[in-house]
């Protein structure tokens, strides 16, 4: 045995196995990371049960707690004693503790707490327990008592649950109408009034503020304002209707809490749900996540504006980066003589790829935003000054900055595609009398288009995940309006926007209640990772197919 | 390739026009494509040039430009000069009790006011409080003092700026009794902050008197009444040159002409206390002038040996405070006047030959020297924005000069060396760019940030280099092609993972996990190779029939469960190890027993997360380099009887080593510039400590944090650009080096 071991060790096999282990470790890390994000991100929307616990508090008093168990972990007793927990003397080693989400932030002050498993004396899953998702203050756990309409009680107990469902449907309809009014018509009127103000200022600046022109603007403004006050009355009426119902809930300890339905988004009984109900609930939550606006400082609700902002930015960036990258690659492969100049260009490409992204952000902020944007403002938008139009971070500058950042990706991919096109094809085209430009345009580029596509896809994937430069050139945590809306000129390149990657950073690290925000961050991260992995896989697939095709061409 | 010249086109007759158009298009396309190619170089140049363009003003030498000279409009010796905010107007206080407000451009009189000095009483001394307050005090021959405040009302009738100078008397027009026995106030000092006034007087009989006026709550809004507290005592210092009171009015510095300084604590006037008495000049050197720098923490003392010394209080070992000489500035000629800027740590000195020299204390630099007058400079005044200066010479001429000196706080030493900042006990490297107070001393040391950047990169490389190089070796050399087709895309996806996600996981998932399982993390380092080798050896002992299930080159797949097992095992063992070796709490043990600080978001976490991000960069390049080593080199080596491992180490790795090196360089470049991971996975405190259990602040994270809130064009903004430029140059050097190595290697392979 010892001899064989020595032989085995001398053969170098242990080293080979260790190098294999490095590959295995890398693979494990990648797959483990993807799995971790997937589990945490997907699990967030599942309606997990809410326990009723009989909890022995450190002072010996028996408390009733309602809560979801979010995490279980083993901690050493010393750790806890250091942190100031009181633990019985005879306990040694490790104990199990739970992270309990008790919600009801407004009534109890904190919505998460750690409790020791040993202190729980009894637990049950009460069927009638109701979870209310609210617009403010997070979730609410409790038992339904009664429902009041216009101050009068209309239902109690089980009947109140039915009434609550109907009441919520009614509230949801009203809310949708309010949203349409506020964001749509009223927003549009505000926008037009602002435009009129700028128009007036412009006339003044140009010295053309004749009484007739001013009167015309005043007239327009008056009509808009009349319309505005009319809409505002409608809105007040809707808000009055919204306040119709109130539900009375009891929480642990028998306390009663009144919650107006206007503040409730959704109500469900997690412990009474069947699997199909849960599945439907899950899908509804998932849909809300991708289609709704964020609530509560981005820690609840959806991420639609972030998705939209990311897509817009990436689209604009692709439009800018594709021609630039492709032309540069064509020059390197088709036109330039291989020599010092191409060598220099390759070094430049390599550096463009290697310069830290934050440096692009600094450059974008200084050059695009303050220098270019400031000049544009002075030339074309003097009426809005000192409020900047383009002289402030925005969608256009973010796209330009990222276009510069992703140019090398497109160049490298396109060049690879071009280099795989056999010379015989070009020579054939030239022999038939085509000029070089025609050969390029009619033969080479169409053949290389999948390679360009690969480059653009990779550039998009890179841009979608890049955050550091965007923090300087246009991303905000909460954009008041989407960059595209119904007001002319419809696409507002000067607006700030939201971005998935920045959303992760902001919600995960800047929000006051990280524990509550974490599941949402995981879900956002999952979405971003899925998009990026899919884009990359697509690029790899296209590239592999392309290689096969050219291989057959060469034979 | 094809030569299509014009005559040939003509030969085609009626198709000639069409052909000419085609050729024109062809030429156009060639130019456009070439322009596109060149523009890549242009864009990288543009980035570099723009960064330099923003940073460049930091290196500009400050300038002074003469604007006007006129005779000072005063009938008596001038006591004091002051300039208002816009530098359009100034005040001249004269000994006869007149105050003349004149235009700084031409000396034209705007307004003349008389101070209520009683008949038969002379003005014998004068003092100005911190310049932003506009408060001055006149010491009279009867032992009383008059406190006056100047301010300038700015109005805009007809859209034009009109500045109206005004005087008021915050303590009332009645004089304040300072010296107890009506002895003349040979020296006086005044200080004001938030409505509280302190007056200090010294009379020739050695009596030092302090008066404090605190506003009282009054029923009538307009009229404020003051409660006066007094204290007096004798000092053994003779011939007092200067009395200085800091803005907080707790410290009184009494400086004698002979170079003695007495430091009193006058926070509580019922118990004034002598803190320290010491000599502040070299023996035999007389004090010419003394002033407080903006903020009132530093005392600048000019001696007749031509040296200006900066002093401030530092803490000593016993916890008490004492004055310490911080730095000296050599000057030329005999100093006559000294004046400090309003809000920066700059100061100006005027000498007997009529030269004015500007200095900056923190940067320890002489900014400029300019001959302003032909005779001695006896009085100076700095505009509040430090953009203009008034100098009064011995011949009664007032010189008005504009100053351009926007970035005095930066010098090579203030950026990269240790600097002794006010309030610190010894020189340190500190980055602290902003604070709430206005006269804050900005600390722009890039050293801790650069150190943090290198520290993060170092730990990341420590994690990434072994894994990526070894992985590349196996993938390129031993792995079955089928598996390689799976591994390479996985690594590509690893590279594509957004760093914001890695940072988020590192900060919110990995950091708490590492904190609670610290022993397990270190156990993994040992356990993983051991377990792998054990499994490998057992595997080789298995019968061939069993071994055939995993073909050659698939060992990595076989090891995945082993790696997962090793991870699970070490994390599972962690609580036991912690209990057994570290008393159940390793972070606490490190802190208490070893004195090693522990942050939850520390370099270990950053190293792992950033290592993860860097692995694919190094892996891809190294793998490429190893894979493209010509196969016949290996075959030759194997044919000569070397084992696969021997031919790998002695032949393949040697040939591919430039490529591997270039991969590592690219990896370092990426680690240095990485922003989101360090931003999210460290505490971002700019400390200088190699401790793996503490965080850091990197250049890139610093830019991300501070750039959005820095004022465009300010020193801070430009220093952040400088940080970006440092990053750019650093990565440029690394990437260019790597690329050149790779190009050489490619040529070498193609010739092989």
Image (tube, rainbow, N blue to C red):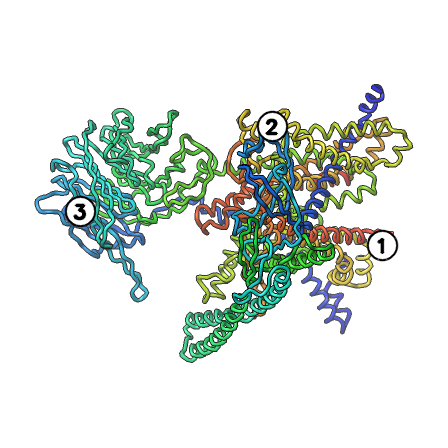
Label 3 packing within 10 angstroms: few (<14), some (14-19), many (20+): many
Above-or-below relation of B695 to A241:
above
Q: Closer to the camera, B601 or B411?
A: B601
Circle 1 marks a residue in which chain? Answer: A
Pick the front one: A376 or B355: A376
Task: Indicate the secondary structure of the residue bearing disc 1.
Answer: helix
Q: Which mark is residue B94?
A: 3
Above or below: residue B569 compared with residue A133: above
Give the percent coordinates (x, y) of residue A186.
52, 70
Q: Mark 1 points at which residue?
A: A553
| Residue B502 relative to residue B588: left or right | right
Nearest to the eye among marks 3 and 1: give it: 3
Which residue has dot 2 on it?
A: A90
Measure how far apart labels 2 and 3 are at the Cα level: 85 Å
Percent of width and height locating residue B730: 58, 40
Crowding near pointer 1: few (<14 within 10 Å), some, many (20+)? Answer: few
């Amino acid at each position: 045995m010892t001899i064989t071991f020595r032989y085995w060790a001398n053969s170098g096999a242990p080293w080979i196995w260790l190098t294999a282990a490095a590959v295995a470790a890398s693979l494990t890390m990648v797959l483990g990371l993807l799995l971790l994000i997937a589990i945490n991100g997907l699990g967030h929307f599942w309606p997990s049960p809410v326990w009723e616990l009989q909890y022995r508090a450190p002072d010996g008093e028996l408390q009733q707690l309602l809560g979801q168990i979010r995490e279980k972990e083993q901690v050493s007793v010393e750790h806890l004693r250091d942190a100031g927990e009181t633990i019985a003397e005879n306990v040694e080693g490790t104990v199990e503790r739970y992270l309990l989400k008790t919600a009801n932030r407004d009534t109890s002050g904190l919505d998460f707490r750690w409790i020791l498993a040993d202190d729980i004396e009894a637990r049950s899953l009460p069927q009638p327990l109701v979870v209310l998702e609210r617009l403010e203050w997070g979730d609410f756990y409790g038992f339904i008592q009664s429902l009041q309409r216009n101050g009068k009680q209309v239902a109690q107990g089980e009947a109140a649950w039915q009434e609550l469902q109907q009441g919520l449907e009614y509230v949801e309809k009203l809310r949708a109408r309010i949203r349409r009014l506020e964001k749509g018509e009223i927003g549009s009127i505000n926008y037009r009034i602002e435009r009129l103000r700028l128009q007036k200022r412009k006339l003044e600046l140009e010295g053309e503020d004749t009484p007739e022109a001013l009167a015309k603007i005043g007239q327009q403004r008056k009509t808009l304002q009349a319309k505005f006050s009319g809409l505002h009355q409608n809105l007040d009426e809707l808000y009055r209707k919204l306040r119709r119902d109130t539900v009375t809930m009891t929480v642990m300890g028998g306390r009663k809490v009144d919650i107006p339905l206007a503040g409730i988004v959704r109500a469900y009984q997690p412990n009474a749900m069947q699997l199909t109900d849960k599945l439907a609930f899950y899908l509804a939550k998932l849909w809300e996540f991708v289609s709704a606006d964020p609530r509560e400082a981005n820690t609840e609700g959806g991420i639609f504006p972030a998705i939209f902002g990311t897509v817009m930015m990436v689209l604009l960036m692709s439009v800018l980066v594709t021609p630039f990258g492709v032309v540069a690659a064509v020059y390197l492969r088709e036109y330039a003589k291989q020599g010092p100049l191409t060598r220099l260009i390759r070094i430049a490409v390599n550096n463009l790829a290697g310069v830290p992204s934050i440096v692009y952000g600094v450059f974008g902020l200084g050059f695009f935003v303050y220098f270019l944007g400031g000049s544009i403002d002075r030339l074309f938008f003097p009426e809005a000054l000192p409020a900047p139009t383009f002289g402030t971070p925005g969608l256009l500058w973010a796209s330009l900055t990222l276009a510069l950042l992703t140019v090398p990706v497109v160049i490298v991919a396109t060049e690879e595609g071009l280099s795989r096109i056999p010379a015989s094809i070009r020579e054939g085209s030239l022999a038939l009398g085509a000029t070089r430009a025609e050969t390029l345009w009619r033969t080479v580029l169409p053949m290389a288009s999948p390679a360009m596509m690969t480059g653009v896809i990779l550039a998009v994937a890179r841009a979608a995940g890049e955050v550091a430069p965007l923090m300087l050139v246009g991303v905000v945590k909460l954009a008041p309006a989407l960059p595209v809306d119904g007001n002319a000129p419809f696409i507002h390149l000067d607006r700030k926007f939201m971005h998935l990657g920045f959303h992760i950073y902001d919600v995960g690290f800047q929000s006051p209640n990280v524990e509550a925000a974490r599941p949402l961050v995981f879900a956002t991260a999952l979405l971003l990772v899925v998009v990026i992995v899919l884009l990359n896989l697509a690029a790899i697939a296209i590239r592999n197919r392309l290689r096969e095709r050219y291989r057959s061409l060469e034979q | 390739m094809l030569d299509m010249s014009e005559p040939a086109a003509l030969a085609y007759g009626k198709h000639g026009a069409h052909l000419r158009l085609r050729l024109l298009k062809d030429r156009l396309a060639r130019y456009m494509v070439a322009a596109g190619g060149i523009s890549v170089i242009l864009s990288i140049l543009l980035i570099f040039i723009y960064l330099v363009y923003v940073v460049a003003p930091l290196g500009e030498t400050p300038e002074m430009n003469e604007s006007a000279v006129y005779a000072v409009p005063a009938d008596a010796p001038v006591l004091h000069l002051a300039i208002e905010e816009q530098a359009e107007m100034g005040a001249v206080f004269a000994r006869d009790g007149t105050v003349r407000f004149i235009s700084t451009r031409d000396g034209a009189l705007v307004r003349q006011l008389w101070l209520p000095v009683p008949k038969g009483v002379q003005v014998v001394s004068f003092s100005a409080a911190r310049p932003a307050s506009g408060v001055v005090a006149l010491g009279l021959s009867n032992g009383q003092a008059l406190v006056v405040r100047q301010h300038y009302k700015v109005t805009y009738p007809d859209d034009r700026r009109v500045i109206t100078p005004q005087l008021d008397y915050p303590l009332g027009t009645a004089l304040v009794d300072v010296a107890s026995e009506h002895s003349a106030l040979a020296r006086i000092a005044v200080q004001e902050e938030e409505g509280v006034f302190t007056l200090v007087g010294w009379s020739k009989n050695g009596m030092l008197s302090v008066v404090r006026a605190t506003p009282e709550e009054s029923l009538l809004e307009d009229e404020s009444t003051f409660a006066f507290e007094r204290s007096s005592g004798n000092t053994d210092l003779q011939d007092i040159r200067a009395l200085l009171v800091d803005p907080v009015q707790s410290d009184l510095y009494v400086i004698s002409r002979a170079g003695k300084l007495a430091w009193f604590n006058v926070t509580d006037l019922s118990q004034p206390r002598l803190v320290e008495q010491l000599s502040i000049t070299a023996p035999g050197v007389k004090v010419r002038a003394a002033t407080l720098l903006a903020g009132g923490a530093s005392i600048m003392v000019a001696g007749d040996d031509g040296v200006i010394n900066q002093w401030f209080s530092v803490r000593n070992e016993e916890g008490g405070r004492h004055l310490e000489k911080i730095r000296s500035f050599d000057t030329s000629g005999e100093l006559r006047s000294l004046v400090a800027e309003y809000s920066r740590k700059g100061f100006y000195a005027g000498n007997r030959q009529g030269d004015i020299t500007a200095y900056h204390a923190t940067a320890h630099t002489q900014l400029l020297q300019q001959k302003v007058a032909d005779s001695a400079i006896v009085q100076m005044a700095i505009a509040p924005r430090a953009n203009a200066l008034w100098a009064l010479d011995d011949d009664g001429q007032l010189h008005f000069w504009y100053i351009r000196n926007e970035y005095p706080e930066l010098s090579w030493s203030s950026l990269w060396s240790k600097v002794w900042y006010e309030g610190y006990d010894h020189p340190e490297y500190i980055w602290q760019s902003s604070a709430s107070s206005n006269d804050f001393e900005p600390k722009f040391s890039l050293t801790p940030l650069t150190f943090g950047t290198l520290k993060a990169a170092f730990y990341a490389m420590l994690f990434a280099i072994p894994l990526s190089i070894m992985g590349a070796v196996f993938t390129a050399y031993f792995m079955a092609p089928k598996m390689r087709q799976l591994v390479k895309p996985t690594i590509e996806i690893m590279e594509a993972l957004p760093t914001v996600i890695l940072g988020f996981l590192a900060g919110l998932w990995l950091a708490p996990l590492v904190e609670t399982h610290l022993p397990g993390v270190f156990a993994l380092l040992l356990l993983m190779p051991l377990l792998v080798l054990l499994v490998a050896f057992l595997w080789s002992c298995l019968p061939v029939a069993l071994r055939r299930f995993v073909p050659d080159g698939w060992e990595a797949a076989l090891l995945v469960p082993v790696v997962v097992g090793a991870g699970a095992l070490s994390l599972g063992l962690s609580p036991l190890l912690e209990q057994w070796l570290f008393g159940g709490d390793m972070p606490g043990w490190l802190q208490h027993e070893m004195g090693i600080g522990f942050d939850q978001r520390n370099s270990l976490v950053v190293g792992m997360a950033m290592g993860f991000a860097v692995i694919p960069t190094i892996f891809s390049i190294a793998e490429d380099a190893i894979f493209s080593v010509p196969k016949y080199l290996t075959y030759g080596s194997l044919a000569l009887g070397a084992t696969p491992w021997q031919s790998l180490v002695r032949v393949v790795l040697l040939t591919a080593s430039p490529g591997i090196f270039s991969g590592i360089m690219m990896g370092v470049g990426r680690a240095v510039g990485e922003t989101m991971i360090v931003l999210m996975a460290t505490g971002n405190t700019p400390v200088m400590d190699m401790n793996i259990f503490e965080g850091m602040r990197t250049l890139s994270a610093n830019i991300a944090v501070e750039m959005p809130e820095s004022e465009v064009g300010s020193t801070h903004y430009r220093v952040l650009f400088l940080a970006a430029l440092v990053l750019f140059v650093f990565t440029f050097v690394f990437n260019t080096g790597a690329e050149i190595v790779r190009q050489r290697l490619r040529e070498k392979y193609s010739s092989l």
